[in-house]
Image (tube, grey):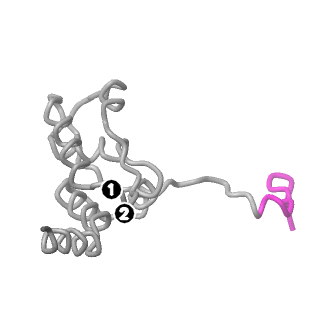
Amino acid sequence: MADEQNPPKQLKEYFTPATYDSPTRTHMPTVTGPFELKHSLIQMLLSFSGLESENPFRHVDAFLEICSTVFLNNISDDALRLRLFPFSLKDKAKAWLDTKINITTWDQLQKEFLKKFFSIGKLTTLRRAIITFS
């Protein structure tokens, strides 16, 4: 039975989570010193929602262009890109990234992103447009 120090739980307490652990999207590289991502940098990033009309290659190009203007002493390019990329996604693309837990480098993230959002169907459509061009 319950003692004075541990009273019995009410039924609603069994259905309420005690803590919440957010899923980690990526395993971030370690950073040796303090750094700060400025709000203005995050605002410069273009948004990608994962819609059919959006081009993931253009998004990555624009993202890398912005990242190339930033230099932080204590952080590598890889770590900077991994930390900034989630801020450039929203909606369907953000939900997709939340499911990725085994990504540890920018190259892995970029490859998975392009594989997911530039499908074989898009490639076939573009090929057909080139072949039937008159």
Vertical placement of 59 versus 9: above or below?
Answer: above
Quote the CA–CA distance across marks 2 and 1: 7 Å
- Callout 2 touching callout 1 (CB < 8 Å): yes
Vertical placement of 116 versus 67: above or below?
Answer: below
Q: Quadrant of the N terminus?
A: bottom right
Q: How many marks?
A: 2
In the rendering, at what x and y percent does residue 120 appear? 26, 75
- Label drawn at residue 26: 1
Residue at 30 percent of width and 28 percent of height: 41
- Label drawn at residue 100: 2
In the rendering, at what x and y percent does residue 53 appear? 36, 57
Disc 1 marks a residue whose amino acid type is Thr
What segment is highlighted magenta in the picture?
1-14
Residue at 15 percent of width and 30 percent of height: 69
Disc 2 marks a residue whose amino acid type is Lys
Q: Residues within 10 Å of mark 1 (few under 14, many from 20)?
A: many
In the image, is 94 to the left or to the right of 77? Answer: right
Quadrant location of residue 107? bottom left
